[in-house]
Image (cartoon, helix red, strand yellow):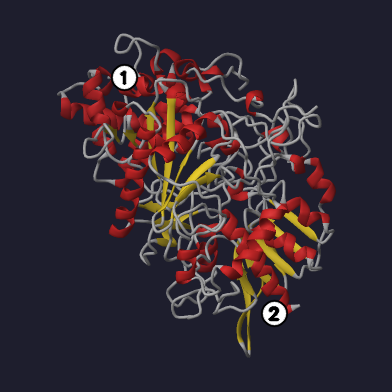
Amino acid sequence: MAGPGGRIPIAPSEAERLNVRVNMPDVLVVGCGGGGAVIAKELAEAGLGVVALEAGPWHDPQRDFTGLEWDMLNPIDAVFRWGPADRTKPPWPRRRDGIPLLISTAGVGGNTLHFGANCPRGYPGTMELDWPMGYAAMIPHYEKVEATLPITVPEIASPKDQLFIRGCEKAGIDHVADADVVRAGWRMQPNAILPVAEEAPELRYPRTDGCTQCGQCIVGCRSPDYAPLERTAKRSTNVSYAPLAMRTGRCEIRTGCFATRILTEQTREGLRARGVRYRDLDGRVFEQDARIVVLAGGAIETPRLWLASELPDTGSVGRNLTTHWFEYLSAEFPHDVEMYMGQTAMARADFPGYGFVESQGLGPLTYAFVSFLGRSWNSGGEGPWTSKGRVIGSALKRKMEAYRRTLMLVVCVDDESEPSNGVSLADGLADENNPAPFVRYHPTQTTTARREWLVDKAAEILLGAGAIPESLHRADAAPSTVHMHGTMRLGTDPATSVLDDGCEAHQVKRLFVADTSPFPNGIGGPNPTLTAQALATRTATKIVERYF
Amino acid sequence: MATADETLRALAETVVPGPPHDDTLGAAEIQAEGFIGHYLESVIPGLSEGVTTILDGMATETREGAAFAQLSLEERAAVLQRLCEHEMQDLRELGDLLLALSLASVYSEWSGLDADGELTRAPLGWELTRWPGPADGYPSLLRKRSG
């Protein structure tokens, strides 16, 4: 494999030192991202031998993360993309209907590589609706993940978040600091980021230990400079759970390995998993047996692998995709805002029954992409926003000149589960592994109405904070998969769910899922990572209980 | 008729104009066609020529015999919008890609990179937005030193 200067990252030296060979694993985990790394660590700590397959590379934050927006994030050849580790090779293709941008990052850490680290719990009211175990049963697992990552609620907000908080107060939103969200309120974010570091003349580890407020969360955290892997401030699973899994001496992570088929055997009791077939970077095909198989490739890849493996489907596999259909509102202020300072999102306002609103700090390119490439063209006028949708030309240049005085809010809606939204296999499109996924998403009227309520609230917050009214802009964003869940829903009835309440497949014993695809609903709208990780933690206990 | 480079430059200028259409520099001044062409070719070899053919075809609907690069800024903007709103999904997605690449040519780090891919000068977009670029941290937002 090529080294620095080549196009294929080499795993960090710490990861190479810790990695062991596990020849006869008890458990095979497919995908070492936000959920896969969690369940690998939990099972390895419980004494089981684990092999985790990961399609992408293991990045070294210090060496590989440049802080440059296009280099790190573009979907074609960036460091973070859905594609092979060799960036000279094309990305893996997907087909779409209604959802122009699918965001996935291959690599140890998965989408936690590029996430903003927000880790709120799901809303109890929404989880009580469709989650058979209920919200209370999830609390011990939430607590375990919060302690392990760890989660830190920052004490001081960055300037952009202080402005957001002022707007919330002006809009009459109460300060509610509870982790369990039962009423509307603003609070500081529970973030999977180490505590803010102490000021120092030079921001270098070990003198500087913790978050340096550099605002690079989404572009790939490499702070503080010279930090060893496990002291990287943002707690993507490649710096938190994955090293912890390997420290048990019972977990092997194999990168550049793309699972192509779930292997099963027929027994008297029915179908059960027995292993996985996968390809390595050179195209060599392997089969790895294991007593238990856990799918953790995410809400697109997990159902894709199930369908490509031709496993039985009672009608729920790949269906009921929820995405929180984001919207972005921005406005200019008569003073500097400097949204790029501080953690990407340090404050939030939750509205059970609707979703949430938060302030977000992005670099100029990412800000332009989410704000000015919406669905409509230079529209506007039907709300408090004077412009909406795509903006090009001199109008775009004036908006971008105001970047330092701009505050941007993100809206995430508790979108309805709709069976026709989801993942199937595309006809006539494939990569070297399997038929490509075909992802379809169209929002329902209820989803749209809830989102409009939140958008009005976001506008109220911006104006309350002192935004220049004529500058209010609404992105009119198309759906995307910044968040994605629901495509392998869990439930008690095999006719309407794929997994039981232990996340084991109804139709295939010893096959479990540990990403966001088991979610029976969109958990009320908040960021899904913590809930996926808590669920994976719980599922590990079910695996041990049932089979070991 | 115009070359692919001229066409892509005219496209980029439509999205991020410079003089005489706008007072500050834009995509044409940084030869954005190099960036856009590179990525079109990496998506599908030959796509730059394909895009030229499509845009010129749509330009003729605006003004008989005119290439896209010969249209006015407003006329080009109208063509780009028609492409992005086309009934065929592949053409809409092509329009989206052209828009995104034009934006990225200016507001990403690209125009600050040298031939080896090293950042050696301020990219145009960082100057236009007054973004200081990626920082190691912001000392004013850190915890005060104890003792």
SS at mark 1 in the image: helix
For mark 2, give the secondary structure: helix
Residue for point 34% across, 39% down? A460
The one of A67 and A59 positioned closer to us in this rendering: A67
**How far from the left and from the top, in percent, is residue A59?**
69, 41
Residue for point 31% across, 41% down = A375
Which quarter of the picture shows residue A309? bottom right
In this rendering, the answer to whether A25 lies above or below A31 is: below
Above or below, A366 relative to B130: below
Q: Which mark is residue A546?
A: 2
Q: Are marks 2 and 1 in contact (CB under 8 Å)?
A: no
Q: Residues within 10 Å of mark 2 (few under 14, many from 20)?
A: few
Q: Chain of mark 2?
A: A
Camera-nearest residue between A272 and A8: A272
Residue A471 visible from this viewpoint: yes
State whether discs 2 and 1 lie on one chain: yes
Q: Position of residue B5 (x, y in %)?
A: 39, 20
| Quarter that holds the C terminus of chain B | top right
- Residue type marked 2: Arg
Q: Would you call the spot at circle 1 few (<14 residues within 10 Å), some (14-19), or many (20 or more)? A: some
Q: Which label sits on residue B51?
A: none
- Residue A126, position as x, y percentages in the image: 45, 64
* Residue A511 in the image, given as x and y percentages of width and height: 62, 73
Q: Chain of mark 1?
A: A
How far is disc 2 from disc 1 in space, using C-alphas? 63 Å
Quadrant the N terminus of chain B occupies: top left
- Point out the tag, 2 or 1, that comes first from the N-terminus: 1
Q: Quadrant of residue B136?
A: top right
Q: Which residue is mark 1?
A: A394
Which one is in front, B69 or A407? A407
